[in-house]
Amino acid sequence: MVALCIPVAWRALSNDSNHEAAPKRVTSTSSAPRSSAAPTKAPKSTSSSPENTPPARTPIARTAPGIQIRVVPAVRDVQVMVDQTLYTTTSDGVVNVPSARGSINVSYVGYSVIPALQVVTFRAWSDGLTPPARTLDANGRGHVAMAIDVRYRVSVTIAGGARTRSRTLTATSSVGPVKFTEGTRRWVLAARGERSSSGVAPRTIEYSFDPPRGAPANRRQTFTAGPEALWTVRAP
């Protein structure tokens, strides 16, 4: 089998919701497109919390004909293959192929931008299927959501405290404890799509540190991740 390299115009990530562009498409005779940029590997979550266990499979609701895939949280330039044609999501995280009919193969391909300010990984489809490749019925059951994880790099600086203080801090979060070393960047889960009986909804992950020295016990220091974020944590 001969694989055809598909050029994709990478763009720096933009969250400007006012910039709406139709999904790009590149027709290919290859069943597996190859990215022109080396993929960035995302750290895998080791959390086994019942909170992160998705509900059982649910049927896809009947809709208008065609294929529509909505990425949650919304991220631009996520690559999706629809019937051997490569598409990238618009700024609102959507790939729309209204002309598709019949049984259509679709799959999550990947995500890569330069510079690599965030990492995107596939989680599940809105009906409960977990493989990134699947078949959709474009005759009326081809509108689905795709749950993803979004990670950003974060570094922590510790303010106050004795000179001999530890250079590491551990934050608590809904996806488990995360250890940070002062001055060292690390990827953390910033947001994820979570399945429910009504579809997929985005959830922002918060990271909480112990209160500063002398502060009340309920005054925890809470942060959310953003591109190349720097968190200043007061020494507990």
Image (spheres, helix red, strand yellow):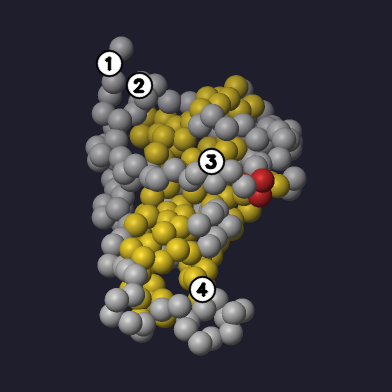
Q: For the point 42% across and 56% down, which residue is it?
A: 188
Kind of residue at disc 1: Val
Q: Find the residue positioned furthest to the front.
A: 164
The amino acid marked with disc number 2 is Ser
Label 4 vs label 1, nearer the camera: 4
As helix, strand or loop, the secondary structure at mark 1 comes to loop
Sequence-wise, which precedes: disc 3 or disc 2?
2
Name which of mark 1 and mark 3 comes first in the sequence: 1
Q: Which residue is mark 3?
A: 123
Cα gap from disc 3 to disc 2, whole angstroms: 25 Å
Q: Which residue is mark 1?
A: 2
- Answer few, some or many: residues within 10 Å of disc 2's Cα (few below 14, many 20 plus, some between 14 and 19): some
**Mark sitting earlier along the chain (4/1):** 1
Q: What percent of the width, then of the height, locates residue 163?
A: 28, 80
Q: Under tag 2, what secondary structure?
A: loop
Position of the N terminus, as image quadrant, is: top left
Q: Marks 3 and 4: CB-CB under 8 Å?
A: no
Q: Which residue is mark 2?
A: 30
What percent of the width, then of the height, locates residue 86? 40, 34
